[in-house]
């Protein structure tokens, strides 16, 4: 197909270590899909995340566990892109890849409250603010209160931030691993 066929295609990018994926991740993805109505939702486990310690769960196993996301919606697909890249996984590189693969696409990046609050420290955060729409959601009221000023600051820098208001499960992969241990 010609390059023009991808114009206005909406891609929802849902990345993370997913070690392991849990019900909170599933709820966040479902809420983001309902809000954005993307043409494609890509679940992309990080290879080597720059902002988190590696947990030791092999990348291939984390990729296989991400099958749990597929029943959420027929538009959900897994991507190995970051797993197959050498070195650390930077979201800016992933977005550039998506823009090259689907010229003219609009990328919506799903972020949790912790990632939103630290967004200005990300590699190429200014470029990202100009090239994606952030789709953010908090796990609890305290986080929501802290996110308000962060969202406004990102908007003042020219960022587009879509804040999901639906309640989400208050759970983390760290907590899941601790309970399993």
Image (spheres, rainbow, N blue to C red):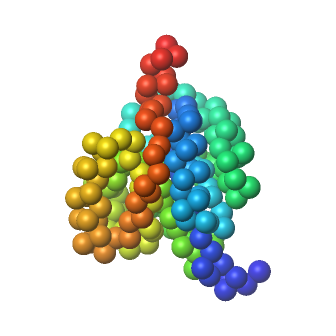
User: Residue 82, can we see it?
Assistant: no
Is 59 on the left or on the right of 158, as rendered?
right
Q: Position of residue 23 (x, y in %)?
A: 56, 36
In the picture shown, does residue 156 fall above or below 85? Answer: below
Q: Is residue 102 above or below residue 142?
A: below
Where is 67 relative to 173, above or below? below
Query: Foreground residue, 86 or 90?
Result: 90
Figure quadrant of residue 154: bottom left
Which residue is farthest right?
1
Specify whether 56 is left or right of 39. Answer: left
Give the x, y percent position of residue 49: 44, 43
In this picture, residue 110 sits left or right of residue 117: right
Q: Give the x, y percent position of residue 129.
A: 36, 68
User: Image height check: is 115 above or below 75?
Assistant: above
Can the viewer see residue 148? yes
At 34% from the left edge and 53% from the top edge, which residue is drawn?
116
Query: Which quarter of the picture shows residue 152?
Result: bottom left
Residue 52, horizontal then vertical, whole percent:
38, 38
The quarter in which the N terminus is drawn is bottom right
Write the residue at 62% across / 74% down.
9
Residue positioned 29% across, 70% down in the render: 155
Residue toward you, 98 or 15:
15
Splitting the image into 4 quarters, where does residue 71 fall?
A: top right
Number of marks in the image?
0
Residue drawn at x 27%, y 57% as measured from the top left: 148
């Amino acid at each position: 197909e010609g390059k023009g066929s991808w114009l206005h295609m909406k891609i929802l990018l849902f990345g993370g270590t997913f070690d392991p994926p849990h019900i909170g991740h599933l709820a966040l993805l479902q809420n983001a899909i309902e809000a954005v109505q993307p043409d494609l939702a890509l679940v992309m486990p990080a290879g080597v995340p720059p902002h988190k310690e590696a947990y030791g769960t092999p990348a291939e196993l984390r990729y296989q566990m991400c099958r749990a996301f597929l029943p959420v919606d027929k538009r959900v697909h897994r991507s190995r892109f970051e797993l197959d890249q050498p070195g650390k996984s930077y979201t800016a590189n992933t977005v550039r890849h998506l823009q090259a693969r689907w010229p003219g696409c609009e990328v919506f990046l799903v972020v949790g409250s912790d990632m939103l609050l630290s967004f200005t420290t990300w590699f190429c955060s200014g470029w990202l603010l100009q090239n994606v729409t952030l789709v953010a959601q908090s796990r609890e009221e305290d986080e929501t209160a802290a996110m308000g000023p962060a969202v406004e600051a990102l908007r003042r820098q020219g960022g587009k931030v879509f804040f999901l208001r639906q309640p989400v499960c208050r759970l983390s992969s760290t907590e899941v691993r601790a309970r399993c241990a």
